[in-house]
Image (cartoon, helix red, strand yellow):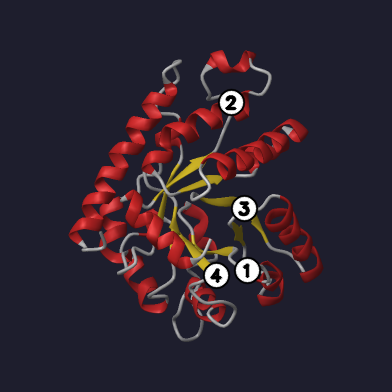
Amino acid sequence: MTYQQLVDFIREQKSFLCVGLDTDLRKVPQHLLSHENPIFDFNRAIIDATAPFSVAFKPNLAFYETYGVQGWQAFEETVRYIRTHYPRHFIIADAKRGDIGNTSQMYARAFFEDLDVDALTVAPYMGGDSVEPFLGYENKWVVLLALTSNRGSADFQLITDADGAPLYERVLKTSQSWADKEQMMYVVGATQGAKFADIRRLVPHHFLLVPGVGAQGGSLQEVCRYGLTPDCGLLVNSSRAIIYADASPSFAEAAAAAARAVQEQMEQVLSEAHII
């Protein structure tokens, strides 16, 4: 998917919601556990329910790898289902890969050639040569970790250099030479609040993938106040608050209602910003 296609879809859907498919069999409705493929069946219902209100889906690989072959197969089926039934939705594999060049080449082949996802989260800690192999695919995206929403982000990401600049700023500045807004996004946690203003000064046009709205307590209004661009420039992810909105057999309807509520807020933001 190209940058412009993503922007156009956001305007069409009146939404910049990314639904996180963090599927945990300990949390899904109990009646699904008797199914042959409960992970995929849960995902399919959530996808069908939330697709009208979202522009992206983000399965987190940890929630699939923990179930071994069964989980990986469910992940593959999930990606194929989205590709077949909702081909305009942006698919982010949240795998946080990043290793020496030849290893990254294998990861890139797995996710961009075999699985055909649109984007992959990548850790920048090992530097440019560990990220470069992911950038060799047309219309595929790297979502680079910059400033995350977890409490431990301060352990390294906020360490300052001799000029007083935090490490995450170094990541943003250095990575500008690796790719432009057409191929690179950045992960910035919703809990980081006003730091979005500083980030936008460094990357004024790139999309930001923003986790942490909903169950983690991030504010959509604050994210939009500081992070919105004329093209929107945001994909705001919500996982638990949507997919686990209800544990009864009516879970999909509850997920749809939760997604619709977020989409309506987003529509208002986009309208007030004259993006739609």
Q: Decide which of 232, 169 is in the foreground and name it.
A: 232
Q: Position of residue 181 (x, y in %)?
A: 48, 73
Q: Decide which of 128, 111 is in the foreground and name it.
A: 111
Q: Mark 2, mark 1: which one is toward the viewer? A: 1
Q: Amino acid at mark 1?
A: Glu
Q: Could you tell which of marks 1 and 3 lies nearer the N-terminus?
A: 3
Q: Amino acid at mark 2?
A: Asp
Residue for point 38% across, 24% down: 253
The residue that mark 4 highlights is 183
Q: CA distance from mark 3 to mark 2?
A: 20 Å
Q: Position of residue 46 (x, y in %)?
A: 48, 31
- Label 1: few (<14), some or many (≥20) within 10 Å? few
The residue that mark 2 highlights is 41
Helix, strand or loop at label 4? It is loop
The residue that mark 1 highlights is 138
Q: Position of residue 271 (x, y in %)?
A: 21, 57
The residue that mark 3 highlights is 117
Q: CA distance from mark 1 to mark 3?
A: 12 Å
Q: CA distance from mark 2 to mark 4?
A: 32 Å
Q: Amino acid at mark 3?
A: Val
